[in-house]
Image: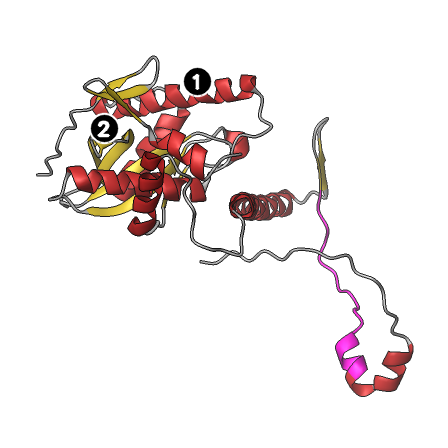
């Protein structure tokens, strides 16, 4: 049985703060905002941020309620329940406070484990429009550092983000998150405690570009899912139209036309260049092509 050490830090919800005796400790969010993600919400209106924060808090509470009493309050919680069930995860603790009991403290959304195992997975829920992997990597890596300080006898098996967005932004999912080197986490927390700015290791990619890459990756993954779903729908519609032997279905919002099988003639330019290189060169012209970015999703 996994037994966790309870921190002496006291959390106050309104205002959001952590105290150890008379001393107020810093939260992980404020540290990351100061040192690494300084422009994460630049240009986003206060109204939008407040609405997002309110929705996020509500879903966090509903997920915790599901873990405690099994109540499914909304679609996002149903997705959360499905993810846990499909992965064989059980909850060890919700809103678990971790701290170095000197400078920093935070609450981990959920500490989980695979059923029957004695290693834990540290989980953070995200309800934002973008599933920010880079931010999660820093956030959860700090959580791991603090968790292991507080629980030296408990091994952390992995870090996980669970994304529960509005349906227009994508489908809920759980993803294991790569850990930042603990040496960098210690440097970050030391710099913050000393009142200096953390200097990240040299990189040819600026932090804001890394964040942009993550957003591009997330969009491409969602696009691929939509394209695959669209392909299946087209195949299903074609089968239905063939079964009913119709060429067109139309409503006030929808038109679907079946194209019958046929043959096409296509010019084999590769073979033509191989067999008639001089003629191919004569009829080839150069055109300017606008620069672009090629993005490859790595498995």
In reply to whether residue 162 is colored magenta, the answer given is: no
- Asked which secondary structure carries label 1, the reply is helix
Q: Nearer the viewer, mark 2 or mark 1?
A: 2
Residues under labels 2 and 1: Cα distance? 21 Å
In depth, the one of 225 and 166 nearer the eye is: 166
Q: Specify the quadrant that holds the N terminus.
A: top left
Q: Is residue 178 above or below residue 109?
A: below
Furthest toward the top, the residue is 14
In depth, the one of 60 and 240 nearer the eye is: 60
Residues at discs 2 and 1 in contact (Cβ within 8 Å): no
In the rendered image, which residue does mark 1 sit on? 54
Residue 174 visible in image: no
Q: Is residue 275 above or below residue 121?
A: below
- Give residue 97's position: percent from left, percent from top: 23, 28
The residues colored magenta run 257-273
Q: Is residue 286 above or below residue 53?
A: below
Q: Specify the quadrant that holds the C terminus.
A: bottom left
Q: Residue at x 38, y 42 (%)?
A: 138
In the rendered image, which residue does mark 2 sit on? 97
In reply to whether residue 272 is colored magenta, the answer given is: yes
Which quadrant of the view contains residue 197?
A: top left
Q: Residues within 10 Å of mark 2 (few under 14, many from 20)?
A: many
Q: Earlier in the sequence, mark 2 or mark 1?
A: 1
């Amino acid at each position: 049985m996994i037994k966790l050490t309870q921190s002496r830090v006291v959390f106050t919800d309104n205002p959001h703060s952590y105290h150890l005796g008379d001393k107020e400790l810093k939260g992980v969010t404020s540290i990351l905002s100061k040192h690494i993600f300084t422009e994460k919400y630049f240009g986003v209106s206060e109204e939008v941020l407040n609405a997002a924060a309110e929705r996020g808090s509500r879903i966090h509470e509903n997920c915790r309620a599901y873990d405690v009493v099994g109540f499914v309050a909304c679609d996002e919680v149903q997705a959360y329940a499905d993810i846990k069930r499909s992965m064989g995860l059980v909850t060890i603790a919700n809103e678990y406070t971790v701290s170095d009991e000197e400078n920093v403290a935070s609450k981990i959304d959920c500490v989980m484990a695979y059923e029957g195992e004695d290693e834990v997975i540290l989980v953070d829920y995200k309800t934002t429009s973008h599933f920010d992997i880079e931010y999660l990597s820093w956030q959860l890596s700090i959580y791991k550092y603090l968790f292991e300080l507080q629980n030296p006898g408990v091994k952390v098996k992995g870090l996980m983000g669970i994304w529960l967005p509005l349906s227009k932004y994508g489908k809920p999912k759980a993803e294991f998150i790569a850990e930042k080197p603990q040496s960098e986490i210690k440097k970050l927390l030391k710099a913050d405690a000393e009142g200096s700015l953390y200097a990240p290791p040299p990189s040819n990619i600026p932090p804001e570009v890394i964040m942009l890459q993550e957003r591009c990756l997330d969009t491409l993954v969602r696009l691929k899912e939509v394209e695959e779903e669209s392909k299946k729908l087209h195949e299903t519609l074609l089968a239905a139209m063939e079964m009913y032997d119709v060429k067109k279905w139309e409503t006030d919002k929808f038109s679907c036309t079946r194209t019958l099988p046929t043959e096409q003639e296509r010019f084999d330019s590769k073979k033509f260049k191989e067999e008639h290189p001089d003629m191919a060169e004569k009829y080839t012209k150069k055109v300017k092509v606008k620069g672009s970015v090629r993005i490859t999703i790595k498995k």
